[in-house]
Structure formats: structure tokens, C-alpha cells
Image (cartoon, rainbow, N blue to C red):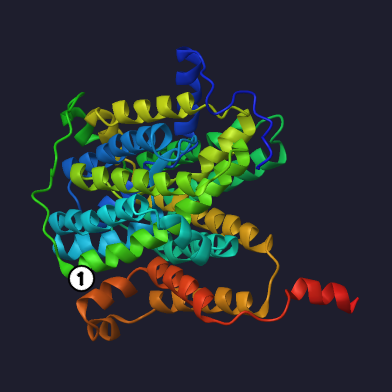
Amino acid sequence: MKQKADLIVGINEHVSPGRAIFLGFQHILSMDLYVFPILLAGMIGLSGSDASYLIQMCFFTCGLATIIQTGLGIQLPVVQGSSFVALSALAAIGSTQGMDVLVGSLIPGAILLCLLGVTKVFAKIIHRCVPAYIGGLVIMIVGISLTSTAASGVISNSGGLLNNLIPGLSAMIVLLILNIYGYKTQYKHKYISLFSVIIALVIGCMVSGFMGTLHFDAVGQAAWFQIPSIFHYGLPQFDASSCILMIFIYFIVLIETTGVWFTVSDVTGEELTDERLNRAVIGEGIGCLLGACFGGTPLTGYSSNAGVISITKIGSRSVVITCGILLSLMGLCPKLMAVIASVPGCVISGVFLVICQILIANGLKIVMKEEMSQKRILVIGLSIVFTVSSMVISADAMASFPTVVQYFLSSGTAVGGLSAVLLNLILPEDAPALKQKEVNAE
């Protein structure tokens, strides 16, 4: 039995509505939920209204998915958000084949996730294929593979190099300073880190405004309230290559979100049983299916919210369900989404560059907790090599591959994540861990 965590409010305890709203907003503020859809819209080339709608649906579907996962799925306080794992692949599909094909590519994989839970095979797969160090390695790979995307958004000639570089670097430097200061004084000023992303975005926007590149034209035209529509971008089109790629991506997303589930289990002291794992993947699949139908994105559990629980010692599911309700309500306000969509891409990229490095560091911390054998060193090294190699393939070389392979290679996360899992399964186990050898040698 897992030892119960030292929580002030347990997962099945209720808090007053007012307190639940306050704590729910705190969870929302700890997330970078708006970063993903803004980046994706820019990479695909969506117009102002379509970009705003994409952001709106990310909030709306994340809220619904959070309610489903926390209330009926894993039944732990897990907040759902857009997964950066899928960013490169979605951008490749959306920019070349359109949003209807992008939406269609998300549906088969989401249904497959539900089937994994219904047939009760998911827990067995996790125990066999995803040891802790693989989960950490995948988080590292996500950060590595997306760093080039973030850097290219800051160092871009579109609209003028300095117009992108100065605001992007300003946001990045502010975020770094606030995080370092917040870390050093976390007991006195713990909210510095919590609000650091919003502060960095505001500073970056102020610099962009000073340079004349910040525009809020779309805000005045946006409505205050809008009911979401199913298949806003048209009826889904099912392209075999895109669907196959996204099934791979969903598998990598599962590795990421499983790590979050284990983290929440540790923070709350609740046992993560096979039954809970199978229910969790059903909840994940339903959330991703809703994301596809309403025009959102693949979802994952957010580790930042596990951090909020560990700080506040409040693990009540009612708080996280309230958070989901608030996210859904925010997603019904196009004017708010238009404000978020007006944030310049270079500023978002500057913030995202720091987020990528935080992902790499967090993944490295998980990996370093495990003893290293020769096999694990090979798995880590080769997976990172394959990730980086996929990022530098020339356009001419890429064009020589079949379409499905091109989509797969365009996502460093898919290449690195799948390599990590397969290498861990294929390479033979070796002698005891290197750390133990070193101890014996001494």
C-alpha cells in the first residue's frame, strides 16, 4: 500500500465554492495553456478568427477533459492540457493538407486510446514498456525537439529581424530572471514563479508595442460569447499517412501523461492501480476525441498542476473539477481568446524557449534518479541522437521518403520517443547498474 501524503485536504474532500474557485484559478495560472495553440496557429498559418477559435477550443476541451478525467477517469486531481508532443506533427499536417485532414488524423488514435482501456490491456503495456527512466527521457526529447521551433520564432526575418528578436529575447530574459529569483526565494516569494510566464508575456508585449508590432484589431471584432461548434473547420478528412503518424504520436503522449499520473499518485499518496490506469486511458481518449470534434488538440496531464498540489497540500478533486469548469467557461469567450491571439509570435517563442529548457531539465532529473546500466546509457544516447538527426534532415532528402515517413520524420518527438521505447524493449539486459559497480569498486 502507498503511504498517504501529508495533504491538508484529501482527494475526496470538498472545499467551499469560493475557495474552490480561487484554488481552481491558481491551477489555471500555473499552466501555459495558451502557448501551444498560438504556436500551432502560427505554424499552420491560420487567420485571426480561426486562430482565436483554435485557442478558444483548447481552453474549452481542456476544461471538459479535466472534468471527465478527474471525475470519472483516473479519479485523481489531474488537469488536462494541450500536449507539446504533438506540435510538430500537427503543424506538418495542418500546413500541408489543411485543418480538415488535421482533425481527421486525431480521431482514430483517440478511439484507440479508449479501446486500450476498455480491453484492460493498457496497464499491462505500461508495466512492460514504460519504466520510469523512459518517461523522463521522453520529456527530455520533447524539450530538445521543440527547441529549434522556439528559436526560429525568435530569430526570424518575418516582419524584420529586430522586430522579432528584441521582444522575444526580452520575454525570455524576464522569464529566466523571475524563475531564478522565485526559486531562490521560494519560501518567501513562491508566487513569483507562478506568475512568471504572464509577467514575461506582458513585458514582451510592451516591447512589441513600443516597436509598433503589437495589434489588437481582432479584439474589437470578436464576440463576448460563442457556443462551440462541432467540426468548425469542416467535416474531417481521413488521410492514411496522417492517421498513422498521429497514432504514433498518441503513443508518445501516453508515455508523457503516464509520468504525470505517477507524479500525482506520489503527491497525493493514492495508489495507481491497474483499474485506475485503464480508466485513465479511457478518460484520455474521450478528452482527445472531444478535442478533435470541437477543433482542439491532443491532451495530456499537466505536471505543473501536480506541483501546485504539492505546494498547497490541497489535493481535492472538487478543486480540479472547478478548474475544469472555469477553463470551459473561458473557452466560451472569443474576445478573451482574441486578446491572447494578439500576443506576437516572437514573444510566445521567447517564453517557449525557456519552457523547452525546463522540460529538458525536468526530464533529466527523472532520468538521474534511476541507476544507469550500459543498456540504459545506450537507449538514452541513441534516442537523443535519432531525435537531433531527424531535425537536420534536408528538404531534398525528406522528399525522397513516402508521405507517412515524411510526417513521422518531421516530428523529432515521435522519432526519439518511439526509438526510446523500442530500444528499451530490444536491447538485452546487462550486468548490474553502473552505480552499483562503482560502489563495489570503491
| x then y, percent, for residue 348 | 39, 48
| x then y, percent, for residue 220 | 19, 28
Give the position of the N terminus as an image quadrant. top right
Q: Is residue 383 above or below residue 224?
A: below
Residue 50 seen in the current view: yes
Q: Is residue 395 left or right of residue 193?
A: left
Which residue corresponds to the image point at 60% horizontal and 41% vertical from the top-left?
A: 178
Q: Is residue 175 left or right of residue 283?
A: right
| x then y, percent, for residue 16 | 49, 13
Which residue corresponds to the image point at 21% horizontal and 66% vertical from the top-left?
A: 242
Q: Is 169 or 64 nearer to us in this picture?
A: 64
Determine whether the residue tagged by mark 1 lies in a helix, strand or loop: helix
Q: Is residue 14 above or below residue 229?
A: above
Which residue corresponds to the image point at 55% horizontal and 39% vertical from the top-left?
A: 306
Q: Is 377 or 340 nearer to us in this picture?
A: 377
Q: Amino acid at mark 1?
A: Ser
Give the position of the C terminus as an image quadrant. bottom right
Residue 140 seen in the current view: no
Which residue corresponds to the image point at 51% horizontal and 24% vertical from the top-left?
A: 23
| x then y, percent, for residue 173 | 55, 49
Q: Is residue 134 above or below residue 262?
A: below
Q: Is 405 or 109 nearer to us in this picture?
A: 109
Q: Which residue is mark 1?
A: 241
Kindly indicate the quadrant of the structure image that contains residue 434. bottom right
Q: Is residue 154 left or right of residue 92?
A: right
